[in-house]
Image (spheres, helix red, strand yellow):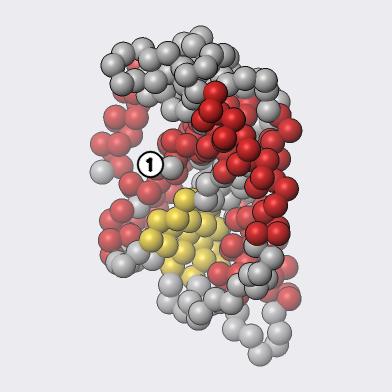
């Protein structure tokens, strides 16, 4: 399965993160007008749009700004941290588990007793975190059941190696949390060695490939779950299947556009 997907991925490329999502912080980056530059976005063919219209674009940015200012208020009634049930015997992979949302997800899952796999670009940082968490445990607490595996979503070969290594164990996987992502605010457009725009690969294509390649293990862990961490900025994204790399010239590249398009693609 992995070999077949690698083959198809390589063919697609020829034809052609820091970890953890940001999202709301780009609200201040809004430009005057939708990426298409026109109202209603002229269709390239029957029933096909080329970009968001003014109304959709404006409504999307209102949602982003609202999330930026009122997210904490909307969640103020929730317990912090949320109480988790005992997770002994549950195997969970969390990508991007050394910073941001992923770090807190990983810490709380580990403390609830899960077998946690930190899938990260920087294994050294992950091991330092594990030592810190272990030192914070009380004397009567059970040792944390955590392991570290290297995974770099900017390389599809790294994704395939990770999945092959895990599947070779013939062990069940109960939960995959695709948390890792990048938002290179204000930086120029960049492409991976696989030939894809960086946001689109790290935030969508690589997590999707990872989930597909891990299906045998997820099936063994049935009923299992795949969780994708997303962003409200998907509301200002537009995915053109014929221009996912934003290279045709139809849309001027901006970092917030690359990010929001990739998060919409994930949805």
Element under disc 1? helix
Which residue does the image show at 44% across and 68% down from the upper left? 91
Above or below for 198 versus 82: above
Work out whether residue 27 or residue 81 is closer to the camera in this orientation and state it. 27
Residue 219 lies, in percent from the top left, at 28, 61
* Residue that protrudes farthest toward the top in the picture: 249
In the image, taking residue 206 as reference, residue 180 lies left or right, namely right
Which residue does the image show at 52% across and 50% down from the upper left? 229
Residue 88 lies, in percent from the top left, at 47, 79
Residue 192 lies, in percent from the top left, at 52, 26
Q: Is residue 245 visible?
A: no
Work out whether residue 205 or residue 74 is closer to the camera in this orientation and state it. 74
Work out which quarter of the rendered image holds the N terminus and state it: top left
In the image, taking residue 141 as reference, residue 172 lies left or right, namely left
In the rendered image, which residue does mark 1 sit on? 209
Categorize mark 1 by other alpha carbons within 10 Å: few (<14), some (14-19), many (20+).
many
Work out whether residue 250 or residue 16 is closer to the camera in this orientation and state it. 250
């Amino acid at each position: 399965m992995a070999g077949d997907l690698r083959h198809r991925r390589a063919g697609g490329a020829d034809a052609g993160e820091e970890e953890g999502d940001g999202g709301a912080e780009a609200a201040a980056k809004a430009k005057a007008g939708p990426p298409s530059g026109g109202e209603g976005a002229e269709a390239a063919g029957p029933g096909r749009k080329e970009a968001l219209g003014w109304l959709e674009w404006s409504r999307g940015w209102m949602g982003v700004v609202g999330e930026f200012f009122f997210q904490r208020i909307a969640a103020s009634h929730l317990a912090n941290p949320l109480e988790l049930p005992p997770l002994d015997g549950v195997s969970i992979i969390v990508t991007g588990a050394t910073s941001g949302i992923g770090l807190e997800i990983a810490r709380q899952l580990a403390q609830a007793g899960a077998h946690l796999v930190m899938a990260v670009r920087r294994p050294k940082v992950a091991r330092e975190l594990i030592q810190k968490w272990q030192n914070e445990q009380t004397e009567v607490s059970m040792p944390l059941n955590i392991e570290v595996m290297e995974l770099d979503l900017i390389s599809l070969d790294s994704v395939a190696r990770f999945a092959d290594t895990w599947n070779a164990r013939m062990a069940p996987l109960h939960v995959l949390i695709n948390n890792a992502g990048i938002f290179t605010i204000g930086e120029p457009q960049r492409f991976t060695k696989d030939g894809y725009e960086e946001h689109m690969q790290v935030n969508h294509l690589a997590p999707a490939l990872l989930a597909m390649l891990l299906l045998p293990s997820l099936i063994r862990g049935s009923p299992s779950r795949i969780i994708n961490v997303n962003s409200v900025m998907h509301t200002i994204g537009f995915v053109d299947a014929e221009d996912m790399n934003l290279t045709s010239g139809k849309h001027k590249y901006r970092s917030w556009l690359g990010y929001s398009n990739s998060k919409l693609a994930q949805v």
